[in-house]
Amino acid sequence: MNGSRAWSAAQRAWDRGAVYAGCSAGAMILARRMPSFRLAGTTEGFGLVPAAFIVPHFDAIPAVFKPLVLTLKRQLKDGERMIGVDEDTALVGSLNGEWQVMGRSKVHVFTRKGEKVYKSGQSLTLS
């Protein structure tokens, strides 16, 4: 998609203030890489949100996929993060700006050094 006419049109729209809302896989693709829950490995994401991975439905991941989440955490390089967004929860913000957790639960931000949890109403900066 990167370098395509469709991608260029999307970028021009964002520059004019268009909004992107992504749920489930639509949120996952906003990161630099996107895990495959059906196939081994990852695929390239849009890279719009400064995160290596975004994992939606984080608090409801079936046990069969828990090892994949651990594998993604181990793949993080220094300075990279993985964002887990619980169900019924949103992370709302602007690209390279301040983001706010909204909804009934939490957002989990993982780095190689550990995890930080943000509750509804709390803000974080992604840059």
Image: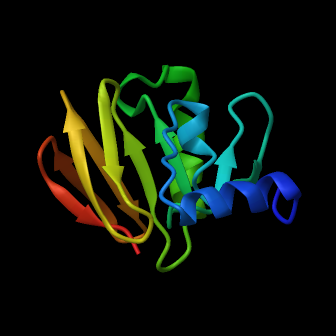
- Taking the view exactly as shown, the residue that stands out farthest to the front is 16
Residue 108 position, x and y percent, is 31, 49
Q: Quadrant of residue 11?
A: bottom right
Relative depth, front residue between 59 and 54: 54
Q: Residue at x 40, y 44 (%)?
A: 84
Name the side, left or right, on which 120 lies relative to 84: left
User: Where, quadrant-wise, is the C terminus in this rendering?
Assistant: bottom left
Name the side, left or right, on which 39 lies relative to 102: right
Q: Is residue 127 above or below residue 21?
A: below
* Residue 46 visible at all: no
Q: Residue at x 29, y 32 (%)?
A: 89
Q: Is residue 3 above or below residue 64?
A: below
Residue 40 position, x and y percent, is 79, 40
Residue 63 position, x and y percent, is 49, 22
Relative depth, front residue between 84 and 24: 24
Q: Residue at x 40, y 66 (%)?
A: 111
Name the side, left or right, on which 12 lies relative to 49: right
Q: How is the image coloured?
A: rainbow
Q: Residue at x 18, y 27 (%)?
A: 104
Residue 4 position, x and y percent, is 88, 59
Name the side, left or right, on which 27 lies relative to 101: right
User: Where, quadrant-wise, is the N terminus in this rendering?
Assistant: bottom right
- Taking the view exactly as shown, the residue that stands out farthest to the right is 4
- Taking the view exactly as shown, the residue that stands out farthest to the bottom is 78
* Residue 73 visible at all: yes
Relative depth, front residue between 113 and 83: 83
Relative depth, front residue between 61 and 101: 101
Q: How many marks?
A: 0
Q: Is residue 60 above or below residue 102?
A: above
- Taking the view exactly as shown, the residue that stands out farthest to the left is 121
